[in-house]
Amino acid sequence: MSDTLTPANVVLLTLQLLMDDLDMDDLFEHAGVPVQLMLEPDGVITARDILALTASAKELSGDPALGLHLGEEMGVEMLDVVGMTISTAPTLREGLDTLQRFSPLVTTMGHADLIEEGDTAKVVLHFLEELAPITDYCMELAAAAAWHIMRRLVRGEFRLRRLTVSSPRPPWYQEYARVLGEEVEFVFDAPENSIVFDRQLLELPMARHTPRLYQSLLDQAARRLAARPQPETASASVLRLIDEHMGARLLDLATLATYMGMTPRTLQRRLKDENTSFQALYDLRRQQVAQEMLLRDINIETIAATLGYSEPTNFYRAFKAWTGLSPSEYRRRHPGAML
């Protein structure tokens, strides 16, 4: 079963903020996550591991508002080269642009969009559906970290105007005001997760701006991003799993989504983003296998069974729909092709 992988470094550094209260060995053992995998230079962690670690950290710490409290303590240096690049940018706008551009070096569990509307600017946060059980935690962590980091980095007063959260209002909602400011409007059960502030704040200068260092860090981040292994596309994953399970009569979108560790809706959306669908990929691969087997002079019954058809007649109809030819006509038109 596949699962989304993300760099482990930031997750590990965030959890280390708990070291005064929790034993890290106990935390990882409780979550069932091998810490050794996260300590590798290019260590990665799965969405399921993040879910397990978050649940264990909340349980062992007894802190339901853990996301807010960890976010308060986070520093930009925890974002490695991306954080250093942000801190040395000329303005907040360019710092946020840097974060958007190089966010895969920090996490692949979501992304952010900067939207400017009238006199407001908002950062809309999109989390993977695999993290749905902890969306509230993710939003609290991101909002608290962003606010406290920006307050330390910009020259001038950085204030939030509004925070919208897609999750219901939690029992600890009053902690939002303490951590993020009494003047902030908090909207729960919202259609999006967003951090809203005055648009003019985007032009605030960064206190640590150093032109040459900023350019050098940009170049370094670009090299790291270019060298980073590209994740397998949803289409490639589906085709690989179809090959592995060819012949299964119950091979469908829901089954493949389970193998890939996501919901059918998420898989369907990712394939749509790649301008395809499960059925198109399934038909494509079965057509390719059928043509190869026909040219090898394998009998129709065997081909039909290999492709998961209960009856040869079903295979006949499908092949005719794919190619406009019957299997026998296809063989006649390609004599000796595989000899």
Image: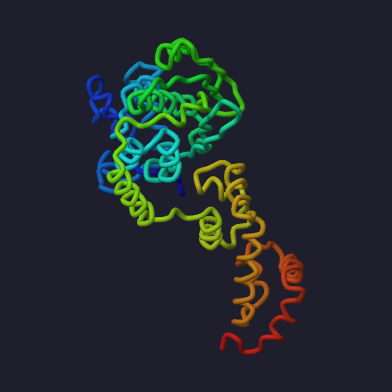
In-image side of 77 versus 249 (left or right): left
Task: For residue 43, say whether it is visible.
Answer: yes
Q: Residue at x 62, y 89 (%)?
A: 336
Which quadrant does the C terminus fall into?
bottom right
To which quarter of the image does residue 322 belong? bottom right
Q: Is residue 328 left or right of residue 153?
A: right
Q: Who's the residue at 44% across and 36% down the image? A: 96
Instruction: Answer left or right for 318 relative to 133.
Output: right
Q: Is residue 16 above or below residue 161?
A: below
Residue 33 in sight from this viewpoint? no
> Could you tell me residue 212's position as x and y percent?
28, 46
Residue at x 51%, y 33% (from the top left corner): 125
Q: Quadrant of residue 120?
A: top right
Comparing 261 with 16, the one in front is 16
Q: Is residue 147 above or below residue 95?
A: above
Residue 150 placement (x, y as % from top left): 38, 27
Query: In the rendered image, which quarter is residue 86 located in?
Result: top left
Answer above or below: position of 276 versus 176: below
**Observer-nearest of 167 and 102:** 102
Q: How many marks?
A: 0
| Vertical position of residue 338 compared to residue 8: above or below | below
Q: Position of residue 228 (x, y in %)?
A: 37, 54
Q: Position of residue 89 (x, y in %)?
A: 36, 38
